[in-house]
Amino acid sequence: MSQFGPNARIKFKQPPDADIVANRVRFHAANTQPDLATPFDEVPVTPPDADGFTYITVGTLPKAAALDGAYDVAITAVDDAGQEGPFLDIDNVDFDFVPPGAPTDGTVVE
Amino acid sequence: MRRALIGLMLAVCAGIAQAACPVGVTCLSWQGDGHYTDNTTIPANFVVVYTLLYGVKGGPYTALAGYNGGPTQAMNTNIQTPPYPKSCFVVTATADTPDSTGKLSKQTSAASSEVCQKPPPGAPSHGSIAAPSDGSVVH
């Protein structure tokens, strides 16, 4: 399974509703049910790319700052009345946002 | 929630039907914080009965909450709506005059306000995680 860093992007299509103003993104334990109670990042809707997909760069989401391991990514749409729709859940994504540790035992040798 | 109810107010699907207000009760209004409120001075000899009804527009309504207010001079009545209303609400207010035994026998007038909310959006679809470099897709 590939590991994704902060530059990875969440790719999805918006529902057909014309009144969507934002998406909410939640990260939760892999292969579990998404829960509205999970803290989320809210991203204002932007026009989709030419391929019809909406992209959100994972590293721009504050809740993703310390991701390390396998997570499900749950995405919802929010309309202009503040109503949140059902989840799109992307299962079992392996994130690694934690940089490696420092090398050790360093010396300079001839 | 505030946004939801503000949106609810804007998203009235069938208009707000209001009958004549009870004596001493100003017409009814939804507040942006999810409460249905009136602030009205009500004559001391009136009892106002509020009922929150919930159902599909045009269909039968089910009472969700009721509040018996007064007799009081300054009425501030809050009826909390459910968190995700999906159809319509009606709040009715009835003003009655108690007789000498306290029985409410003389209904004077009633007011109601119907507000309908549009359904929430659907779910996004075709979700995946894309690597930034080559656009390859996992899942």
Image (cartoon, grey):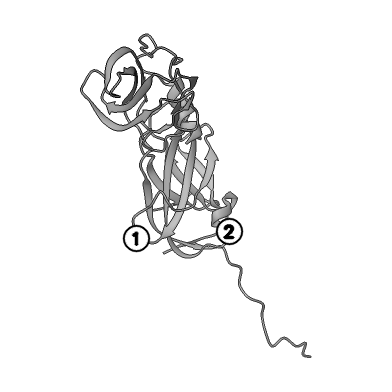
Host chain of mark 2 = A
Host chain of mark 1 = A
**Residue drawn at x 35%, y 10% as measured from the top left:** B19
Q: What element carries label 2?
A: loop
Q: Specify the quadrant that holds the C terminus of chain A.
A: bottom right
In the rendered view, does A104 fall on the left or right side of B62? right
| Vertical order, A97 against B118 (above or below) | below
| Vertical order, B38 against A84 (above or below) | above
Would you name the residue on which mark 2 appears?
A: A65
Please state which amino acid type lies under the numbered disc 2: Ala
User: B49 or A55: which is nearer to us?
Assistant: B49
Q: Most extreme residue toward the left, as rendered?
A: B60
Separation of marks 1 and 2 at Cα, in angstroms: 20 Å
Task: Where is residue A70? Give x, y as percent.
Answer: 43, 64
User: B94 or A96: which is nearer to us?
Assistant: B94
Q: How many marks?
A: 2
